[in-house]
Image (cartoon, rainbow, N blue to C red):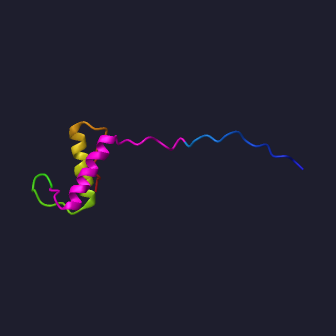
Amino acid sequence: MAVRKKSGPRKKSSARKKTKYGPAARKDVGEALHELELGELESGRSGRKVTSRKQAIAIGLGEARKSGARVPKKAPPKKK
């Protein structure tokens, strides 16, 4: 009967990467979500109340970009 040889310690997956968002970006997004919960978050141009969670996150990330926080670039618009 052949004896199996144990392999060495496993390497960590290279697919794991650090987060691309900095702590300041998380703070801005958190503040935008808090304003959404309170019903105080308004969109930029029209000044209408924001009701969508996704839109609140986008507003928070936009504010983070303006303040110079570490945030990934915007995705290019999808082609139809």
Please give the name of the residue rendered at 26% of the width and 55% of the height, measured from the top-left corner.
33
Instruction: Tell me the quarter of the picture where residue 54 sits.
Output: bottom left
Residue shown at 13% from the left, 52% from the top: 44
**Which part of the image, by quadrant, shows the C terminus?**
bottom left
Q: Residue 9 magenta-drawn?
A: no
Q: Is residue 31 magenta?
A: yes
Give the farthest residue toward the right. 1
Residue 78 position, x and y percent, is 29, 52
State the residue in front, 56 or 2. 56
- Up/down of 47 relative to 18, above or below: below
User: Residue 7 location in percent, x, y?
Assistant: 73, 41
Which residue ends up furthest to the top in the rendered image?
Answer: 68
* Left or right: 46 as drawn, with respect to 37: left
Left/right placement of residue 8 relative to residue 56 reads: right
Residue 17 horizontal/vertical position (percent): 46, 41
Tell me if 38 is positioned left or right of 12 in this view. left
Nearer-the-camera pick, 35 or 80: 35
Q: Is residue 45 visible?
A: yes
Image: magenta residue range = 14-42
Residue 73: in sight, yes or no?
no
Q: Is residue 60 above or below residue 67?
A: below
Please give the name of the residue rendered at 31% of the width and 38% of the height, measured from the top-left corner.
70
Quarter location, residue 23 = top left
Residue farthest along the left direction in this orientation:
46
Residue 31 at x, y = what percent? Answer: 24, 51
